[in-house]
Amino acid sequence: MLQFLKKGKPASPEKKGLFNRLSQGLTRTRKHFTTSIANLLLGKKLIDAEILDTIEGYLLTADVGVAATQVIIKELTQRLERKQLTDATILYQALQEDLVELLTPFAQPLLLPADVQPYVILMVGVNGSGKTTTIGKLAKYLQQQGKTVLLAAGDTFRAAAIEQLQIWGERNQIPVVAQQKGSDSAAVIYDAIMAAKARAIDVVIADTAGRLHTQQGLMDELKKVKRVIAKCDRDAPHEVMLVLDAGIGQNTLNQARQFHADVGVTGLTLTKLDGTAKGGILFALAQELRLPIRFIGIGEAIDDLRPFDAMEFVTALFEQDDNATICN
Protein backbone atom coordinates (compact mmCIF):
# COMPACT_ATOMS: atom_id res chain seq x y z
CA MET A 1 0.00 0.00 0.00
CA LEU A 2 1.16 3.54 -0.73
CA GLN A 3 2.02 5.09 2.64
CA PHE A 4 1.91 8.73 1.52
CA LEU A 5 1.85 11.33 4.31
CA LYS A 6 2.67 8.80 7.02
CA LYS A 7 6.40 9.34 7.25
CA GLY A 8 8.20 10.40 10.40
CA LYS A 9 7.54 9.39 13.98
CA PRO A 10 4.83 6.80 14.63
CA ALA A 11 1.56 8.34 15.74
CA SER A 12 0.59 8.09 19.39
CA PRO A 13 -2.30 5.72 20.23
CA GLU A 14 -4.56 8.74 20.82
CA LYS A 15 -3.57 10.38 17.54
CA LYS A 16 -4.01 7.09 15.70
CA GLY A 17 -7.44 6.64 17.24
CA LEU A 18 -8.50 10.11 16.09
CA PHE A 19 -7.18 9.41 12.59
CA ASN A 20 -9.04 6.10 12.45
CA ARG A 21 -12.31 7.88 13.32
CA LEU A 22 -11.66 10.42 10.58
CA SER A 23 -10.89 7.66 8.10
CA GLN A 24 -14.05 5.80 9.08
CA GLY A 25 -16.09 8.99 8.78
CA LEU A 26 -14.89 9.48 5.22
CA THR A 27 -15.73 5.92 4.16
CA ARG A 28 -18.57 6.86 1.78
CA THR A 29 -16.58 9.60 0.05
CA ARG A 30 -13.56 7.32 -0.20
CA LYS A 31 -15.59 4.50 -1.81
CA HIS A 32 -17.12 6.94 -4.26
CA PHE A 33 -13.90 8.68 -5.20
CA THR A 34 -10.47 7.39 -4.18
CA THR A 35 -11.31 3.69 -4.39
CA SER A 36 -12.44 4.26 -7.98
CA ILE A 37 -9.12 5.90 -8.78
CA ALA A 38 -7.16 3.11 -7.10
CA ASN A 39 -9.10 0.55 -9.13
CA LEU A 40 -8.46 2.55 -12.30
CA LEU A 41 -4.72 2.46 -11.68
CA LEU A 42 -4.60 -1.19 -10.64
CA GLY A 43 -1.83 -2.84 -12.62
CA LYS A 44 -1.35 0.13 -14.97
CA LYS A 45 2.23 0.44 -16.22
CA LEU A 46 1.68 3.33 -18.62
CA ILE A 47 0.12 6.65 -17.59
CA ASP A 48 -1.45 8.65 -20.40
CA ALA A 49 -3.91 11.47 -21.05
CA GLU A 50 -6.82 9.03 -21.17
CA ILE A 51 -6.22 8.03 -17.55
CA LEU A 52 -6.13 11.69 -16.52
CA ASP A 53 -9.45 12.24 -18.36
CA THR A 54 -11.01 9.43 -16.34
CA ILE A 55 -9.63 10.83 -13.08
CA GLU A 56 -11.12 14.20 -14.05
CA GLY A 57 -14.53 12.55 -14.28
CA TYR A 58 -14.12 10.95 -10.86
CA LEU A 59 -13.18 14.32 -9.34
CA LEU A 60 -16.24 16.00 -10.80
CA THR A 61 -18.67 13.29 -9.68
CA ALA A 62 -17.19 13.49 -6.16
CA ASP A 63 -18.22 17.17 -6.01
CA VAL A 64 -14.65 18.44 -6.13
CA GLY A 65 -16.01 21.14 -8.44
CA VAL A 66 -15.02 22.39 -11.87
CA ALA A 67 -12.50 25.03 -10.75
CA ALA A 68 -10.65 22.75 -8.32
CA THR A 69 -10.70 19.85 -10.80
CA GLN A 70 -9.20 22.04 -13.52
CA VAL A 71 -6.37 23.10 -11.20
CA ILE A 72 -5.59 19.50 -10.24
CA ILE A 73 -5.76 18.07 -13.76
CA LYS A 74 -3.65 20.92 -15.14
CA GLU A 75 -0.93 20.15 -12.61
CA LEU A 76 -1.06 16.41 -13.33
CA THR A 77 -0.96 17.07 -17.08
CA GLN A 78 2.13 19.22 -16.68
CA ARG A 79 3.78 16.44 -14.69
CA LEU A 80 2.84 13.96 -17.41
CA GLU A 81 4.34 16.21 -20.10
CA ARG A 82 7.54 16.48 -18.06
CA LYS A 83 7.57 12.66 -17.96
CA GLN A 84 7.35 12.70 -14.15
CA LEU A 85 4.35 10.33 -13.96
CA THR A 86 6.26 7.19 -14.85
CA ASP A 87 3.97 4.70 -13.11
CA ALA A 88 0.68 4.35 -11.23
CA THR A 89 2.20 4.72 -7.78
CA ILE A 90 3.82 8.03 -8.67
CA LEU A 91 0.56 9.31 -10.17
CA TYR A 92 -1.37 8.24 -7.08
CA GLN A 93 1.08 10.10 -4.85
CA ALA A 94 1.16 13.16 -7.11
CA LEU A 95 -2.62 13.42 -6.97
CA GLN A 96 -2.54 13.39 -3.17
CA GLU A 97 0.21 16.02 -3.10
CA ASP A 98 -1.81 18.29 -5.38
CA LEU A 99 -4.94 17.89 -3.27
CA VAL A 100 -3.04 18.73 -0.09
CA GLU A 101 -1.48 21.76 -1.77
CA LEU A 102 -4.91 23.00 -2.81
CA LEU A 103 -6.38 22.71 0.70
CA THR A 104 -3.44 23.75 2.88
CA PRO A 105 -3.77 27.56 2.57
CA PHE A 106 -7.34 27.34 3.85
CA ALA A 107 -6.79 24.93 6.75
CA GLN A 108 -6.68 27.69 9.35
CA PRO A 109 -7.44 26.88 12.99
CA LEU A 110 -9.67 29.08 15.09
CA LEU A 111 -7.22 31.15 17.16
CA LEU A 112 -8.48 33.20 20.08
CA PRO A 113 -6.33 36.24 20.95
CA ALA A 114 -5.41 36.43 24.62
CA ASP A 115 -6.29 40.13 24.79
CA VAL A 116 -9.90 39.80 23.56
CA GLN A 117 -12.59 39.03 26.14
CA PRO A 118 -15.16 37.96 25.37
CA TYR A 119 -14.33 36.60 21.94
CA VAL A 120 -17.67 36.54 20.11
CA ILE A 121 -18.45 33.78 17.61
CA LEU A 122 -21.60 34.30 15.56
CA MET A 123 -22.88 31.00 14.14
CA VAL A 124 -24.88 31.16 10.91
CA GLY A 125 -26.28 28.64 8.44
CA VAL A 126 -29.42 27.19 6.91
CA ASN A 127 -31.94 24.95 8.65
CA GLY A 128 -30.71 21.40 9.03
CA SER A 129 -27.00 22.17 8.62
CA GLY A 130 -26.21 20.99 12.15
CA LYS A 131 -25.54 24.46 13.50
CA THR A 132 -26.90 24.08 17.03
CA THR A 133 -25.23 20.70 17.51
CA THR A 134 -21.98 22.20 16.23
CA ILE A 135 -22.27 24.94 18.85
CA GLY A 136 -22.45 22.35 21.62
CA LYS A 137 -19.44 20.50 20.28
CA LEU A 138 -17.48 23.71 19.73
CA ALA A 139 -18.23 24.81 23.28
CA LYS A 140 -16.84 21.53 24.60
CA TYR A 141 -13.77 21.86 22.38
CA LEU A 142 -13.06 25.35 23.71
CA GLN A 143 -13.53 24.16 27.28
CA GLN A 144 -10.90 21.54 26.63
CA GLN A 145 -8.60 24.38 25.50
CA GLY A 146 -9.04 25.94 28.94
CA LYS A 147 -11.55 28.60 27.87
CA THR A 148 -14.69 29.63 29.72
CA VAL A 149 -17.73 29.73 27.45
CA LEU A 150 -21.21 31.25 27.44
CA LEU A 151 -23.92 30.33 24.94
CA ALA A 152 -26.47 32.76 23.51
CA ALA A 153 -29.74 31.18 22.33
CA GLY A 154 -30.24 33.59 19.45
CA ASP A 155 -32.41 31.19 17.45
CA THR A 156 -35.66 32.48 18.89
CA PHE A 157 -37.79 31.16 16.02
CA ARG A 158 -37.65 27.57 17.24
CA ALA A 159 -38.38 26.64 20.84
CA ALA A 160 -36.60 23.36 20.16
CA ALA A 161 -33.39 25.22 19.31
CA ILE A 162 -33.48 27.04 22.65
CA GLU A 163 -34.09 23.80 24.51
CA GLN A 164 -31.36 22.02 22.59
CA LEU A 165 -28.84 24.70 23.47
CA GLN A 166 -29.89 24.59 27.13
CA ILE A 167 -29.34 20.83 27.16
CA TRP A 168 -25.83 21.32 25.77
CA GLY A 169 -25.21 23.93 28.45
CA GLU A 170 -26.38 21.67 31.27
CA ARG A 171 -24.37 18.74 29.94
CA ASN A 172 -21.14 20.72 29.90
CA GLN A 173 -21.89 23.11 32.79
CA ILE A 174 -21.91 26.12 30.48
CA PRO A 175 -24.21 29.10 31.16
CA VAL A 176 -26.85 29.82 28.51
CA VAL A 177 -28.56 33.17 28.02
CA ALA A 178 -32.01 32.58 26.58
CA GLN A 179 -35.44 34.16 26.35
CA GLN A 180 -38.76 32.77 25.25
CA LYS A 181 -39.57 31.85 21.67
CA GLY A 182 -40.27 34.89 19.52
CA SER A 183 -37.96 37.21 21.43
CA ASP A 184 -35.68 39.58 19.57
CA SER A 185 -32.59 37.61 18.56
CA ALA A 186 -30.27 40.61 18.60
CA ALA A 187 -31.39 41.53 22.13
CA VAL A 188 -30.71 38.00 23.41
CA ILE A 189 -27.20 38.02 21.98
CA TYR A 190 -26.54 41.54 23.29
CA ASP A 191 -27.56 40.45 26.80
CA ALA A 192 -25.30 37.40 26.52
CA ILE A 193 -22.27 39.48 25.58
CA MET A 194 -22.89 41.94 28.41
CA ALA A 195 -23.26 39.00 30.84
CA ALA A 196 -19.98 37.54 29.58
CA LYS A 197 -18.24 40.88 30.12
CA ALA A 198 -19.56 41.04 33.68
CA ARG A 199 -18.42 37.49 34.43
CA ALA A 200 -15.05 37.77 32.62
CA ILE A 201 -15.97 34.84 30.34
CA ASP A 202 -13.59 34.11 27.49
CA VAL A 203 -15.93 33.18 24.64
CA VAL A 204 -19.53 33.82 23.65
CA ILE A 205 -20.99 31.49 21.02
CA ALA A 206 -24.18 32.95 19.59
CA ASP A 207 -26.74 30.78 17.83
CA THR A 208 -28.97 32.31 15.15
CA ALA A 209 -32.09 31.08 13.41
CA GLY A 210 -31.45 28.80 10.46
CA ARG A 211 -32.45 30.48 7.23
CA LEU A 212 -32.20 29.83 3.54
CA HIS A 213 -29.59 31.98 1.85
CA THR A 214 -32.34 33.14 -0.53
CA GLN A 215 -34.53 34.60 2.27
CA GLN A 216 -33.40 38.20 2.08
CA GLY A 217 -35.60 39.37 4.94
CA LEU A 218 -33.98 36.91 7.32
CA MET A 219 -30.54 37.72 5.95
CA ASP A 220 -31.23 41.36 6.72
CA GLU A 221 -32.01 40.32 10.29
CA LEU A 222 -28.56 38.77 10.53
CA LYS A 223 -27.08 42.10 9.48
CA LYS A 224 -29.04 43.71 12.32
CA VAL A 225 -27.64 41.15 14.77
CA LYS A 226 -24.12 42.06 13.64
CA ARG A 227 -24.81 45.76 14.13
CA VAL A 228 -26.11 45.20 17.64
CA ILE A 229 -23.14 43.03 18.56
CA ALA A 230 -20.83 45.81 17.41
CA LYS A 231 -22.41 48.09 20.03
CA CYS A 232 -20.85 45.84 22.68
CA ASP A 233 -17.48 45.70 20.96
CA ARG A 234 -16.77 47.48 17.69
CA ASP A 235 -14.58 44.56 16.57
CA ALA A 236 -17.26 41.96 17.30
CA PRO A 237 -18.33 39.49 16.14
CA HIS A 238 -14.74 38.35 15.95
CA GLU A 239 -15.73 35.25 14.00
CA VAL A 240 -18.71 34.69 11.72
CA MET A 241 -18.74 30.92 11.35
CA LEU A 242 -20.87 29.44 8.58
CA VAL A 243 -21.97 25.86 9.18
CA LEU A 244 -22.52 23.86 6.00
CA ASP A 245 -23.97 20.39 5.46
CA ALA A 246 -21.47 18.51 3.28
CA GLY A 247 -24.24 16.18 2.12
CA ILE A 248 -25.84 18.79 -0.13
CA GLY A 249 -22.78 18.96 -2.37
CA GLN A 250 -22.49 21.86 -4.78
CA ASN A 251 -25.37 23.78 -3.18
CA THR A 252 -23.03 24.57 -0.29
CA LEU A 253 -21.19 26.89 -2.68
CA ASN A 254 -24.34 28.92 -3.31
CA GLN A 255 -25.04 29.11 0.42
CA ALA A 256 -21.50 30.19 1.24
CA ARG A 257 -21.42 32.85 -1.48
CA GLN A 258 -24.65 34.46 -0.30
CA PHE A 259 -23.88 34.34 3.43
CA HIS A 260 -20.42 35.76 2.77
CA ALA A 261 -21.84 38.57 0.64
CA ASP A 262 -24.43 39.48 3.29
CA VAL A 263 -22.65 39.04 6.62
CA GLY A 264 -18.95 38.57 5.87
CA VAL A 265 -18.16 34.94 6.74
CA THR A 266 -14.74 34.50 8.36
CA GLY A 267 -14.66 30.72 8.78
CA LEU A 268 -16.36 27.54 7.57
CA THR A 269 -17.37 24.36 9.38
CA LEU A 270 -18.38 21.34 7.29
CA THR A 271 -20.72 18.90 9.05
CA LYS A 272 -22.07 15.41 8.29
CA LEU A 273 -19.04 14.25 6.33
CA ASP A 274 -19.63 10.79 7.76
CA GLY A 275 -23.02 10.49 6.06
CA THR A 276 -22.18 11.55 2.52
CA ALA A 277 -20.22 10.52 -0.54
CA LYS A 278 -19.76 14.22 -1.38
CA GLY A 279 -16.79 15.00 0.86
CA GLY A 280 -14.99 16.33 -2.22
CA ILE A 281 -16.98 19.55 -1.75
CA LEU A 282 -14.20 20.71 0.60
CA PHE A 283 -11.90 21.14 -2.39
CA ALA A 284 -14.54 23.14 -4.28
CA LEU A 285 -15.12 25.41 -1.30
CA ALA A 286 -11.40 26.00 -0.84
CA GLN A 287 -10.75 26.79 -4.49
CA GLU A 288 -13.84 28.91 -5.17
CA LEU A 289 -14.57 30.63 -1.83
CA ARG A 290 -11.01 30.88 -0.49
CA LEU A 291 -12.30 31.13 3.07
CA PRO A 292 -10.68 29.54 6.13
CA ILE A 293 -11.94 26.03 6.90
CA ARG A 294 -12.04 25.82 10.71
CA PHE A 295 -13.67 22.48 11.57
CA ILE A 296 -15.14 19.35 10.05
CA GLY A 297 -17.80 17.11 11.58
CA ILE A 298 -17.40 13.36 11.11
CA GLY A 299 -19.94 11.88 13.51
CA GLU A 300 -22.34 12.37 16.39
CA ALA A 301 -19.87 12.08 19.28
CA ILE A 302 -18.83 15.22 21.15
CA ASP A 303 -15.25 14.97 19.86
CA ASP A 304 -16.24 14.27 16.25
CA LEU A 305 -15.99 17.99 15.55
CA ARG A 306 -12.30 18.45 14.86
CA PRO A 307 -10.02 21.22 13.62
CA PHE A 308 -9.48 20.84 9.90
CA ASP A 309 -6.05 19.57 8.85
CA ALA A 310 -5.46 19.36 5.09
CA MET A 311 -2.82 16.64 5.16
CA GLU A 312 -4.73 14.52 7.63
CA PHE A 313 -7.92 14.88 5.59
CA VAL A 314 -6.31 13.79 2.32
CA THR A 315 -4.46 10.94 4.01
CA ALA A 316 -7.73 9.65 5.45
CA LEU A 317 -9.44 10.10 2.10
CA PHE A 318 -6.87 7.85 0.44
CA GLU A 319 -6.63 5.31 3.25
CA GLN A 320 -6.92 1.71 2.04
CA ASP A 321 -6.78 -1.75 3.52
CA ASP A 322 -3.25 -2.67 4.54
CA ASN A 323 -3.17 -5.32 1.84
CA ALA A 324 -4.37 -2.98 -0.90
CA THR A 325 -2.05 -2.01 -3.72
CA ILE A 326 -2.37 -0.10 -6.95
CA CYS A 327 0.32 -1.90 -8.85
CA ASN A 328 1.28 -5.45 -9.68
Image (cartoon, helix red, strand yellow):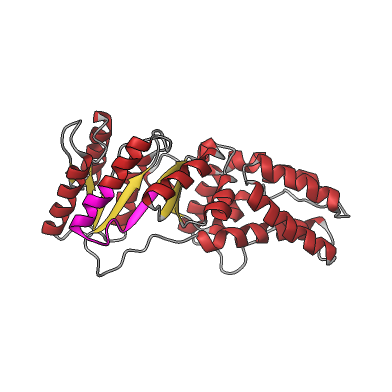
* Residue positioned 60% across, 41% down in the render: 29
* Residue positioned 45% across, 42% down in the render: 244
* Residue positioned 24% across, 70% down in the render: 115
Query: Which x, y percent locates residue 215?
Result: 39, 34
Residues rendered magenta in the picture:
225-241
Question: Which of the image's four quarters has the N terminus?
Answer: bottom right
Of residues 95 and 72, which is closer to you in this image? 72
Of residues 199 and 146, which is closer to you in this image? 199
Indicate left or right for 15 with 78 as reference: left
Furthest residue in direction right, as rendered: 46
Residue 319 in view, yes or no: no
Query: Which x, y percent locates residue 51?
Result: 82, 49
Quadrant of res 146: bottom left
Query: Which x, y percent locates residue 252?
Result: 51, 41
Residue 7 in view, yes or no: yes
Q: Is residue 223 magenta?
A: no
Q: Is residue 231 magenta?
A: yes
Query: Which x, y percent locates residue 154?
Result: 24, 41
Tally the numbered discs: 0
Q: In this rendering, is residue 300 above or below 241?
A: above
* Residue positioned 18% across, 57% down in the render: 232
Indicate left or right for 108 with 65 as reference: left
